[in-house]
Image: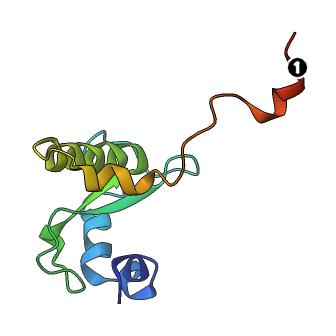
Amino acid sequence: MTYQDYISSARWRFSAARLAELEASGFRCRLCDEPATDDLQLEVHHRTYVRLFSELMRDLTALCSKCHFGVTDMHRRSKYSARTPTASDVIPSITRPLALFDPSMAGARS
């Protein structure tokens, strides 16, 4: 099972550890203390992936969607900041040179 399949599954949605963390947080974000609302979704962040698929409550943290995005972004920036991109990271994504003009404007020159 992939991570995406797991996060989308009933196994994750009804996980005892996930539900215990939501309840322990009072159904509020652990960072900004905002409650879950129709406009602000509460999510459960993995603090560690050591026990992925059989998490303990201490492996998880309840976060609102805004804080979850911020925490995930911070972790990714930290992880990749020390890594220097190589040509193989960049060159394969360039499949053909980009046009130097907008083709839809070809007849619009004066």
Image quadrant holding the C terminus, namely top right
Up-down relation of residue 83 to residue 107 (above or below)? below
Tell me residue 61's x, y (percent).
23, 60
From the viewer's perspective, tell me whether residue 99 is left or right of residue 62: right
Tell which of 104 and 50 is nearer to you: 104
Q: Which residue is mark 1?
A: 108
Tell me residue 69's x, y (percent).
36, 47
Residue type beneath disc 1: Ala
Which residue shows up at 54% across the image and 43% down it? 97
Up-down relation of residue 2 to residue 69 (above or below)? below
Q: Quadrant of residue 108?
A: top right
Tell me residue 22's x, y (percent).
32, 65
Which residue shows up at 20% across the image and 49% down it? 75
Up-down relation of residue 70 to residue 72 (above or below)? above
Neighbour tally class for label 1: few under 14, some 14-19, many 20 plus, Cα within 10 Å? few
Image quadrant holding the N terminus, namely bottom left
Is residue 28 visible in the rendered image? The answer is no
Tell me residue 45's x, y (percent).
28, 61
Q: Quadrant of residue 53?
A: bottom left
